[in-house]
Image: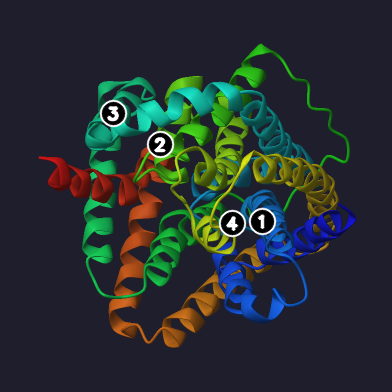
């Protein structure tokens, strides 16, 4: 048992490191571990490696919100949170936003674990039934959210147009033979990262003093958002073609929140952070419940342990609880440290530096994967320009998630029609 606890803390350390480094996906670290498994299994057990991977995934999913919220580095699970999070930082509420996303992730893990017996019975049954209708679920949820969370007909038309345009961009980009990791990084950096920071430069050239005190008061609406995030994340772990991007649409619809309204910002962040962490856990648990790994880490684990039983499930849940608890403390500490550093730096210079860093990291991966430089440059410029539009129009940036949702709709429509 002690060795598994040690494995958990090693995984937390690796996940924290990968979460803080923009552009590094947890699956990269998982691939390195799996490639080294022949040697590692001569030193430790398969359960040791799996616990390490579980805790690494959970820690990464929570810690990655720190650079995303404070510096604007987008990942698939944090992209839609950047605008409201960045807006709160500019209001001097960096401590608040870090606590919101941390509590949202922690609460969602508790919700999913408590609801696990119900999910174990219901979701395998729903998995087979809903698979042919995945594209319909995505389409209906997207239209509902676009209509319900826009204030008037003008905003609805603009939101719908942005959803379609981003979907066309995603379809064109992902049809190329270029590595999906590079194309995702390129489009997400433009749509949600660089564009958000560029727009914020128009509003302020200095970072305001950050409020050193904040207490998160949980009320019914906040619990509702955490619950919505946990439930949605669990559903994502079983439905094919669904990820945090698509889950944001469902979570917003379930919690009735809008990333563009100040009153709903906290609830929106709670829901989106919660679904990201919950999805991470359930993509691993899906190995046991439906025998289908739903993430890169889950695939590696399924090779290490060919037949997962209830004892393995209990161990992984314990590892998840320990990992999310330790990561919660780390997230708060790291977020507060980042906030102090940011106060000592000129905001305009910091923003320009972050943009340049995002571009440098992107081109490092472009050259590493030998992707066409001119094509990727055009894609980055196009996605950045498209990402600027919601700011000037006055609608939520979550509609730009059409970049992933529309390709998924088309793929599953072709598959089952």
Residue named by callout 2:
394
Of residues 117 and 160, which is closer to you in this image? 117
Relative to 181, say whether 257 is above or below: above
Which label's residue is closer to the chain start, 3 or 2?
A: 3
Q: Residue 58, how many percent across, how many down?
A: 67, 50
The residues bearing labels 4 and 2 have C-alpha atoms spaced at a distance of: 19 Å
Q: Please name which of the two marks, 4 or 2, marks the residue nearer to the observer.
A: 4
The circle on residue 129 is: 3
- Say how the picture is coloured: rainbow
Residue named by callout 4:
72
The residues bearing labels 3 and 2 have C-alpha atoms spaced at a distance of: 39 Å
Which label's residue is closer to the chain start, 3 or 4?
A: 4
Q: Please name which of the two marks, 3 or 4, marks the residue nearer to the observer.
A: 3
Residue named by callout 1:
60
> Element type at marker 4?
loop
> Element type at marker 3?
helix
* Structural crowding at the residue carrying mark 2, measured as other residues with C-alpha within 10 Å and reported as few (<14), some (14–19) or many (≥20): few
Q: Residue 189, how many percent across, how many down?
A: 46, 62
Relative to 74, say whether 183 is above or below: below
Is 16 positioned to the left or the right of 288 in the image? Answer: right
Is 226 positioned to the left or the right of 231 in the image? Answer: right
The residues bearing labels 4 and 1 have C-alpha atoms spaced at a distance of: 16 Å
Image quadrant in which you'd find residue 250? top left
The residues bearing labels 3 and 1 have C-alpha atoms spaced at a distance of: 32 Å
Relative to 310, say whether 348 is above or below: below
Is 52 positioned to the left or the right of 230 in the image? Answer: right
């Amino acid at each position: 048992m002690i060795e598994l606890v040690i494995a958990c803390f090693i995984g937390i350390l690796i996940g924290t490191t990968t979460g803080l480094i923009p552009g590094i996906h947890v699956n990269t670290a998982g691939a390195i571990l799996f490639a080294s498994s022949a040697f590692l299994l001569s030193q430790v057990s398969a359960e040791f490696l799996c616990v390490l991977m579980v805790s690494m995934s959970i820690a990464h999913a929570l810690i990655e919100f720190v650079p995303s919220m404070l510096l604007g580095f987008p990942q698939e699970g944090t992209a839609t949170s950047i605008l409201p999070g960045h807006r709160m930082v500019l209001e001097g509420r960096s401590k608040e936003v870090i606590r919101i996303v941390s509590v949202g992730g922690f609460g969602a893990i508790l919700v999913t674990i408590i609801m696990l017996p119900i999910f174990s019975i219901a979701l395998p049954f729903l998995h087979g039934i809903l698979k042919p209708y995945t594209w319909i679920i995505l389409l209906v949820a997207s239209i509902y959210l676009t209509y319900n969370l826009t204030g008037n007909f003008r905003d609805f038309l603009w939101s719908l147009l942005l959803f379609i345009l981003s979907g066309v961009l995603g379809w064109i980009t992902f049809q190329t033979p270029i590595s999906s990791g590079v194309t995702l990084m390129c489009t997400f950096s433009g749509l949600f990262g660089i564009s958000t920071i560029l727009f914020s430069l128009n509003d302020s050239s200095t970072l305001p003093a950050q409020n050193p005190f904040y207490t998160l008061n949980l009320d019914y609406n906040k619990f509702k958002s955490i619950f919505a995030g946990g439930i949605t994340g669990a559903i994502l772990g079983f439905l094919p073609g669904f990820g945090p991007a698509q889950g944001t649409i469902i979570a917003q619809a379930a919690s009735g929140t809008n990333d563009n309204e100040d009153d709903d910002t906290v609830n929106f962040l709670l829901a989106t952070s919660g679904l990201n962490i919950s999805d991470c856990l359930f993509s691993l648990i899906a190995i046991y419940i439906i025998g289908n790994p739903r993430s890169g880490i889950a695939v590696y684990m399924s090779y290490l342990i060919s037949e997962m039983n209830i004892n393995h499930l209990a161990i992984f849940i314990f590892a998840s609880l320990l990992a999310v608890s330790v990561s919660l403390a780390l997230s708060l500490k790291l977020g507060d440290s980042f906030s102090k550093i940011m106060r000592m730096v000129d905001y305009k210079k910091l923003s320009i530096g972050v943009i340049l860093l995002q571009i440098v990291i992107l081109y490092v991966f472009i050259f590493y994967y030998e992707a066409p430089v001119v094509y990727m440059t055009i894609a980055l410029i196009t996605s950045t320009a498209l990402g600027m539009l919601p700011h000037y129009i006055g609608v939520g940036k979550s509609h730009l998630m059409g970049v992933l949702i529309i390709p998924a709709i088309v793929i599953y429509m072709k598959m089952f029609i």
